[in-house]
Image: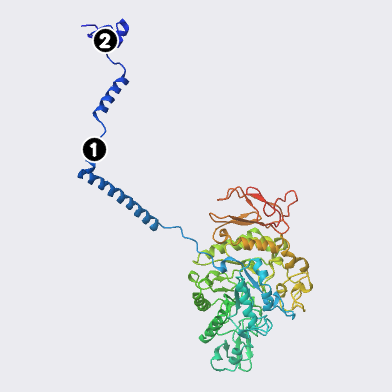
Amino acid sequence: MSKAENGGGMAPNEVDSLTGNEGNDPMKVKFVGRSEDVEKGRRAQKENNFKPLSKEELAEYAKDPFWSKIRWLLFILFWTLWAGMLVVSIIIIVLTPKCPTPKPKEWWQKAPIYEVYAKSFKDSDGDGLGDLKGVTSKLDYLASLGVGSVWLSPVYKSPMDDNGYDIADFESIDPTFGSMEDFKELVAEMKKRGLKLIMDLVPNHSSDQHPWFQKSIEKDGEYTDYYVWRAGDSSTPPNNWLSVFGGSAWSFDERRGEWYLHQFKKSQPDLNLRNPLVIERLKEVMKFWLNLGVDGYRFDSVAHMFESEDFADEPANDASNSDDETAYSSLLHTKTYEQPENLDLLAVFREVLDEKTAEDETSPRIMMTEAYTDDLNKYYGPNGTISHMPINFNLITAFKDKSTVSAKALHNAIIPYIAEVKEVNHTWPNFNLGNHDNPRVRSRFGPELIDGINMVVMLLPGTPITYYGEELGMEDLLEVQNDPRDPERSPMIWNDQENAGFTNGTPWLKITDNYKSLNAEVQMNDPLSHFSNYKVLAKLRMNDAVLLGSFDPVLEGDVFGYSRIKKGNPGLVVLVNFGEDNALVDLHERKFFPDYGTISIVSQKGSNLTQEENVYSPGNRVYFNDVKLGPKEG
């Protein structure tokens, strides 16, 4: 046996290699030393052992009942699982809670409400008094401005002792303003332009010339108790109640021999709203105008509607600044103001509006209510079931003159109010910047802030209410002619012609001195005017970011503002510097803010910064980490 066969401790191929005898020994057995070759051999043998089935063999299996059942079982199982997953997916999609879709805003929530003081808006017949045809002639102006509705001051038949708030017939038009046909024309023309009409209605009192009152004096049947009467000596009023205009709230009528209550002028006797017949008559009045196409009412003086049934004296107001004991402010009006029955009656009036809305739910009829109060929320009612819009006077009462204006004061007048309104379901805020009873924005905030304050109010989460002429920055008259409220009631300034285009006759009140530079015609042709800025703001209000988006206030030093953001929509930022110096604001770290934005609007005539610093104009880019604002700039 060779050394190789005996092993020798070496692999065979290694022995042959060392001895040089590889391939010379006839008895030698060849050993394969590489593992790859071994594996190849094994694989070849395996392939020889497992040959693929022929076509004929496959056909035999296809016909085999056992394999046929297996195939059908797998087929059914696959489609059952597929259908099950589809059903489960659909169930998950249907049952999974979805993010609630925001309810679309109604007409009264979207565009600004514009108060037209009819006597001062536009005279069509040359008698110096504004009228219905005058309003109709200016509807294109209002539509172009971007307002959505008109709140019209009283145009009912009246002796005009209180400029129409003393109503002698709730269902007729005073000849001063035109005819019923003029009113119907106004409604029709407004509807053509998509404008809504809100009428002023006074449920608390009427004129002493109203037939109801004249019949009540005579104790004529049901009219006997239409007003608040009290028996007593003609020299001594029933109690110490005072009129809003000063003096006793009681007057003695010689014919009836009794005292009647008037919380306002002597010529405005209070209706007895505890009498169901009076309520029914007022509901009929509402239905009368609603059937003529009116879209809602602004109810005047609703806090005065009821008085205490005990007719007890009211306590003195120790905080009063008046030494006059007959001044309205000298008493605390615990018996005549905001009595609980007021809300019950407003709920009755709301039912009338809701009944009309039910006829056409695409055009809801609304209620606005006037009450100067510290608790505005109660006028909304539970879940917003009373007043759609209890008018918010914070921006009037908090800012009497320029000395009261600051970023902090504006923040305090707006932010807590918004938070309070959110506490009541189904409610919507509003912001009244001026009206026929208070000085204009120009007088209270100053001319430099006209655009800035409009920017703030117009894009807030709530409806802006604009008094006529505020879009132009109109000023108050410098003197009082008849009524202490005359300065804010001067005629609208339409152009630079005589009497500012208000009338061809003699205006009932003086035209403001600066009408040649501030009139509507001039401003409509100036892209940087107050009018043009207001128009841009009215258009921006239609963005979803304003109507449905978040509200995040900004208060940095003298700068007040906020952002309005809704995912998937362009966001908006409002900033106004209320200070006397330049201000710098850094917003880039705020949530959802990009590095920069594009300017939509700036204060009239641009910034108050120097020419080198003034980089802002509509269309320009502004970086949010370096927003520069000049004094009083927005």
Residue 399, horizontal then vertical, whole percent: 66, 65
The foreground one among 502 and 40 is: 40
Establish if 80 lies above or below 270: above
Q: Are marks 2 and 1 in contact (CB under 8 Å)?
A: no
Query: Percent position (x, y) of residue 569?
Result: 56, 55
Between 55 and 151, the one lying in front of the other is: 55
Q: Residue at x 52, y 71 (%)?
A: 362
Q: Name the foreground residue: 266 vs 252.
A: 266
Query: Which SS class for mark 2?
Result: loop
> Hey, what amino acid is under mark 2?
Gly
The front one of 35 and 597 is 35
Image quadrant where residue 405 sits: bottom right
Q: Which mark is residue 56?
A: 1
Which comes sooner in the sequence, label 2 or label 1?
2
Classify 10 Å Cα crowding around label 1: few (below 14), some (14-19), many (20 and above). few
**Which coloring applies here?**
rainbow
Residue 619 visible? The answer is yes
Can you give x and y, in whole percent of width and height, for residue 227 in the image?
57, 87
Q: Name, please, the residue furthest toward the front.
A: 56
Badge count: 2
Q: Residue at x 23, y 45 (%)?
A: 68
Whole-angstrom CA distance, mark 2 to mark 1, is 56 Å
Camera-near label (2 vs 1) is 1
Quadrant of image for the C terminus: bottom right
Is 457 displayed left or right of 519 in the figure? left
Residue located beneath label 2 in the image: 9
User: Which residue type does callout 1 highlight?
Assistant: Glu
Q: Position of residue 449 (x, y in %)?
A: 70, 61
- In the picture, the disc for residue 326 is none
Residue 462 appears in which quarter of the rendering? bottom right
Quadrant in which the N terminus appears: top left
